[in-house]
């Protein structure tokens, strides 16, 4: 039974060329979304989402939260190097803003990345993500392959979620 608390998925997707050239990220994220959609409004409350794509810079795919079923992955563009640190800062800033606006919000942060940043250092940004202190907040890290930087992914999750895992990969 729902506690009346609303959950919001914050999906951060690595769309750097190194990921896009080796993995069908749209299919992998589609599988994650399909699994999340089956949760519905059960124990976690009503679910909506915000999606951040990042390659050479982070960009939100919509200006406001949307239903999981409305998220369009076909418009993902794969580009250049990876700005993981900038993406984590953008993610933390948005979550903090949303929680200030809706204190009952339960953020569920999902990072789909190999954990490798080629443009900036993610370490300070990981700290900023962990400074958000909301009851019930969950962090999940999923990698498209086993050759990822799992140390960075583990630090993203911290004590707020399960061990980072490898998504079933299908090479593009």
Image (cartoon, rainbow, N blue to C red):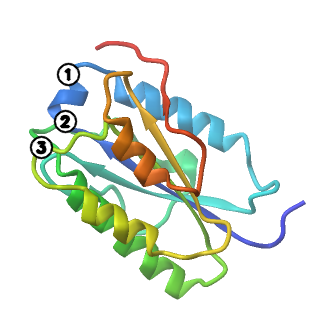
Q: Identify the residue at the far right of this view.
A: 1
- Please tell me the numbered disc located at residue 167: none
| Displayed quadrant of residue 57 | bottom left
Compared to residue 92, the image places residue 76 above or below, namely above
Alpha carbons under labels 1 and 2: distance apart: 8 Å
At 74% from the left edge and 72% from the top edge, which residue is drawn?
5
Neighbours of disc 3 within 10 Å: few (<14), some (14-19), many (20+): some
Along the line of sight, the residue nearer the viewer: 76 or 160: 160
| Closest to the observer, 128 or 83 | 128
Q: Is residue 63 visible?
A: no
What is the quadrant of the C terminus in the image?
top left
Distance in Å between CA atoms under marks 1 and 3: 16 Å
In the picture of the structure, the residue carrying the numbered disc 2 is 78
User: Label 3, on which residue?
Assistant: 118
Q: Is residue 17 left or right of residue 29?
A: left
Which corner quadrant of the image does residue 171 belong to? top left
Residue found at x 60% / y 65%: 137
Q: Is mark 2 on a helix, strand or loop?
A: loop
Q: In the image, residue 102 lies at what x, y percent?
A: 58, 83
Mark 3 residue element: loop
Q: Give the left or right position of residue 22, taking residue 139 as reference.
A: left
The answer to whether residue 53 is seen in the rendering is: yes
Expressed as whole percent of the image width and height from the top left, the position of residue 46 reads 71, 62
Q: Which residue is drawn at 39% across and 13% down?
A: 170
Q: Do the residues labelled 1 and 2 touch (CB within 8 Å)?
A: yes
- What number is the disc on residue 21? 1
Query: Horizontally, is 155 left or right of 56 in the view?
Result: right
Q: How crowded is mark 2: few (under 14 residues within 10 Å), some or many (20 or more)?
A: some
């Amino acid at each position: 039974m729902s506690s009346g608390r609303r959950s919001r998925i914050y999906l951060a997707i690595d769309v750097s060329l190194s990921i896009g050239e080796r993995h069908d990220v749209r299919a992998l994220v589609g599988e994650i979304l399909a699994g999340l959609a089956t949760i519905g409004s059960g124990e976690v409350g009503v679910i909506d989402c915000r999606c951040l794509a990042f390659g050479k810079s982070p960009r939100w795919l919509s200006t406001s939260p949307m239903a999981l079923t409305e998220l369009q992955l076909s418009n993902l563009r794969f580009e250049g190097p990876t700005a993981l640190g900038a993406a984590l800062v953008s993610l933390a800033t948005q979550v903090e803003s949303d929680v200030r606006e809706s204190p009952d919000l339960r953020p569920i942060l999902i990072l789909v990345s190999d954990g490798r940043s080629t443009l900036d250092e993610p370490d300070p940004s990981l700290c900023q993500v962990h400074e958000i202190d909301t009851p019930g907040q969950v962090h999940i890290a999923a990698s498209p392959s086993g050759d990822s930087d799992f140390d960075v992914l583990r630090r993203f999750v911290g004590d707020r979620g399960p061990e980072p895992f490898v998504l079933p990969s299908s090479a593009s």
